[in-house]
Each structure stands twice: as C-alpha cells, then as structure tokens.
Image (cartoon, grey):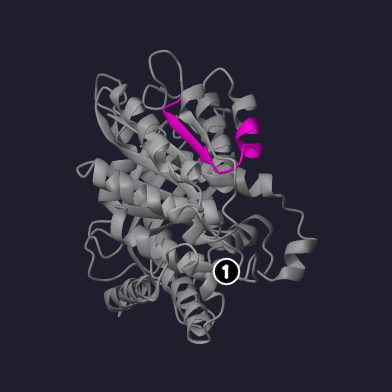
Amino acid sequence: MSTVFVQVGQCGNQMGQHFFHQVCRSDEKRSTFLTPDKKLRSVHIDTEKKVLKKVVKQHKKSIRECNVVSGKQGRGCNWAMGYNGPNNLAQAKLPDQVLESLRKEVERCDCYSGTVMMHSIAGGTGAGLGSRLVELIRDEYPLAYILSAVVAPWTSGESPLQHYNSLFSLSWLQRYSDGVLMFSNDEILHRLSGLNVNKRDRETANVTIDDMNKYIAESLAGVMLPVNSLTPKSGVCIGNEPWEMLRSVCPMPAYKFVQIGHTSKSDVTWEALASTHTHKLRRYDTDGNPFSSISTLAVVRGDSTGTFPRSIKSVESKITSAYNCVKWNPFPVDFWISSRNLNSHPGTSSITVCANSSSIVEYTESVFKRAQDMFQAKAYLHWYQRYGCDETTFLESFETLNGVINEYKEAVS
C-alpha cells in the first residue's frame, strides 16, 4: 500500500526535507516511500521559490521536477489569500497544478492508500492553501485517507493574523482530514530544552529551527517507518503504518487531534527509556487540571534482542499513568515493536508515543478566545473580506472549533 506526501509552504517543505532525510538513511525497506525508479512519492508546493530550491538541491536525484509546484507571489500570512488565491488568474490555478501532480503520483502507486500533508496552520500558504488542498483532495479521492501533520505557532505570537489563520485551519482539518498530528512550537522547545514557553526563554534557548524540524521528523519517522508488528511473515513491508496508526488513536471522527512525543537513547533499559520520555511530558493545563488521553499508541524501536515483551507491563503502567488514560477505554495503550531503531546504531533504542489527548483543548480554547475577541472588535476583517472570506466563514469556523472543544471535554469528563 502506498502513501503520497504533500508538503505545503515553507514549514511543510522543511518538515518534509528532514523527514525524507530520516527515511533515506534508514535501513528499513523503503518501498512505500519510493517509486521503483527510486523517486520520492512526494509533491512539493510553495507560493515562492526560495525554500523549494533548497529542498530540490538537497534531494536532487530523488524528487521529480514535475512534482515541484511554485507560484510567484506569497500569501501575505493571510488565510483567505492562501485559500482563494490572490486577485491574479495565473496564481489562482496553483491548486489545479497541485492536483494534476498528485494525480500522476497516485497513478504510479500500486495501491494508493492516502495522503500525508505537512504544513503550518499559521501562515498564508501553509494555513490557507493547505486548507484548500485538504478540501480538494477529499473531494477528488473520497475513499482515501488524509493525515495532516501540522505545526502550531508560538503562543507568544508570530503575526497579528495567526489566531484567525489557526481558527480556519483547525476548522478545515476537522471537516476534511481523518487525523491531525499536531506539533506545537512551544511544546517542542519545552521537550528539547526543558525551558518554559515564553519569548525570553525562546531567545536564550540553545535550540535552532533545524533542531525542532529534526525532532518533528524523528517523531513522524517513529510512527511511519515499518515495524515488525505490522510486517507479514514474508518480510515485505506493506506500508500501512500511517493508516493503522489512525485506526488505533483516532477511532471516532469527533476526536482527530493527536500529539506525538519521541525519545531516543543508547544503553538503557526499556523502563528507564519510558521514564525519560514521560519526565518532560506536560500533564496539567495552566489551571492545574490534568490532561487525559482517549487512546494511545507507543512505537518501540531497537528491540534487536527481543527483550521488550518482558518489560511491556511496566512500560504500559508508566505510560497509562503519565498520560492519564481514560477509564472507559479497555485497551488504553497499543504497542508496536521494531527490531531496528531509526539511526541503526547498535545499542540505541527509541520510543514514540502518539496520544489522542485532551491537551488539545487548551490550545483550541486559546485560539477560539483570541480569534473571537478580534472578531467582535472587527479587527483585520477587511484583510480577509478582500479575498472572499465573509462573516459566514468566520461563524461556521467558530462553531466547528467549539464543537471540537466540547467533544473532547465530554470524552474525558
């Protein structure tokens, strides 16, 4: 089964660049990521050429030129401009060019399973064009899966429009995606440096954007590269990991938002690795209320000696406690096991945990409140109305996001 990766905007292409670097250096079978002629099953989109040139230069031999789609005008950090396009007929055809490249890539697949999209939810291209493409791909391939890997902006602010952009993006993802792998810049900084998430700490932290993208890539590779648990006896990987993950952690359409954490160490016991992973986990919101996980998947890699099954009960206990798994789920933690780790170094092991957690409520409530305050004050509305985004679009997005918040609260109450 084959998956096509669609990378949108600067953030999406940088994420994909690091992810495919992980894929290409892995010893695992890569048939699900590469076509028979050793080309990546990927489509790269941006409204400007600068980032795409760097991506193509790094993966020159493995990226098809016809799968690189670029425009000539940015989207001004405006969701409406990204979604509907600028007032320029040539630039408005960009989504059609993307669909044509995607169609050709799908036809190269032996059995097309779905699309993994990578993008930001704050910028004009990632948020706006990304939302448009999710909707178009759903209409074009209604029976295929769509998994979105997205990055949420700093809560301290990147743009005055980021709350509107996030509101619309989250609303579109809830409507059209089957699952959303949510990465937060604040949470990644916290895990990599242990610092609190404020602007002063961001400036003093010794963590680069490349470090953060590498962490995201390792997290995605942790769940998407082949595992022994899903590989048949023939030893041929069928590439079903992204979609089995969806069935495991997103069993109901009301709960689509998943957080991923990844930890890798050498020469440690499985119990110690699990303890290290859960140590930096945020367990409470700012009001002191505990987060809860509806469903959880733990992917363990580097079990070359087959010792993990003897430790599975203690590791499960640590994860169940740390993620505060809901009582009504009789199987709160699912495990996948792989004999090889991502980096192939002897003695190293890793654990990647995907949790469908109520921690998403804290972020979505913040987006909802800030966007609502701006909307009631009529701040920046003309920037969106200029590109065809009317009041109805705002109200429907508020309703969709409020529904997400209420569903998660009810699930863990």
- Left or right: residue 254 compared with residue 45: left
**Residue 93: % across, % down:** 43, 41
Tell me which segment is drawn in magenta.
40-54
Answer whether residue 41 is magenta in the image: yes
Count of numbered circles in the view: 1
| Viewer-closest of 335 and 212 | 212
Query: What residue is shown at x 32% (from left), y 25% (from top)?
Result: 237
**Residue 360: % across, % down:** 43, 68
Answer whether residue 118 is magenta in the image: no
Query: What residue is shown at x 66% (from left), y 38% (from top)?
Result: 50
The image quarter containing residue 171 is bottom left
Whether residue 307 can be seen here: no
Query: What residue is shown at x 56% (from left), y 67% (from top)?
Result: 162
State the SS at label 1: loop
Whether residue 236 can be seen here: yes
| Viewer-closest of 45 and 315 | 45
Crowd around label 1: few <14 · some 14–19 · many ≥20 (10 Å): many
Q: Amino acid at mark 1?
A: Leu
Q: Residue furthest right?
A: 204
**Residue 25: % across, % down:** 55, 25
Query: What residue is shown at x 48% (from left), y 86% (from top)?
Result: 376
Residue labelled with disc 1: 161
- Left or right: residue 338 compared with residue 377: left
- Left or right: residue 197 compared with residue 366: right
| Viewer-closest of 11 and 310 | 11
Figure check: 364 above or below 301: below
